[in-house]
Image: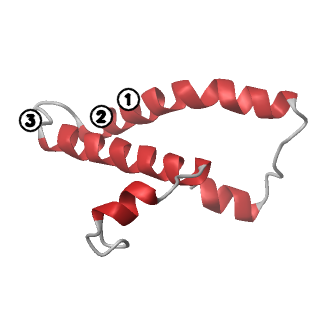
Amino acid sequence: MIIARGDLAAIAASRLNGGALWVLGAVASWALYSVCLRRLPTGLDRLAFLAMTIAIGLVPLLPLYRWELGQGLNFELDAISLGAIG
């Protein structure tokens, strides 16, 4: 809405590429996480909640990572890649 200046016709005419769809998925995921965080039970440890969130997020990523490795793609484990992961 901001980019199209509220013009619904411009939004309807725009085409989304793969990268834009990934970003929209990430935004929806972050919104869901934020809603869940607000409803976090008081007795639940926040670090445990974070660990479970990370574990659940790794489940759909693992097959994609294994597919990339099968294609011969990998990354160097250096300071830059470790910083990005961190």
Q: CA distance from mark 1 to mark 2?
A: 5 Å
Q: Residue 28's x, y, as percent? A: 34, 44
**Residue 6 in which image quadrant:** bottom left
Q: Amino acid at mark 1?
A: Met
Vertical placement of 46 versus 82: above or below? above
Is the C-beta separation of discs 1 and 2 under 8 Å? yes
Q: Quadrant of the C terminus?
A: bottom right
Among numbered discs 1 and 3, the one appearing first in the sequence = 3
Q: Residue 11's x, y, as percent? A: 37, 60
Residue on which disc 2 sits:
49
Q: Amino acid at mark 3?
A: Thr
Among numbered discs 3 and 2, the one appearing first in the sequence = 3
Vertical placement of 78 versus 51: above or below? below
Residue on which disc 3 sits:
42
Taking the image as shown, residue 48 lies to the left or right of residue 38, namely right
Q: Amino acid at mark 2?
A: Phe
Q: Residue 16's x, y, as percent? A: 52, 52
Q: Which mark is residue 26?
A: none
Q: Which mark is residue 52?
A: 1
- The residue that appears at 36% across and 42% down in the rendered structure is 29
Is the C-beta separation of discs 1 and 3 under 8 Å? no
Is the residue marked by circle 3 packed among few (<14), some (14-19), or many (20+) residues within 10 Å?
Answer: few
Is the residue marked by circle 1 packed among few (<14), some (14-19), or many (20+) residues within 10 Å?
Answer: few
- The residue that appears at 91% across and 36% down in the rendered structure is 72
Q: Helix, strand or loop at disc 3? A: loop
Q: Helix, strand or loop at disc 2? A: helix
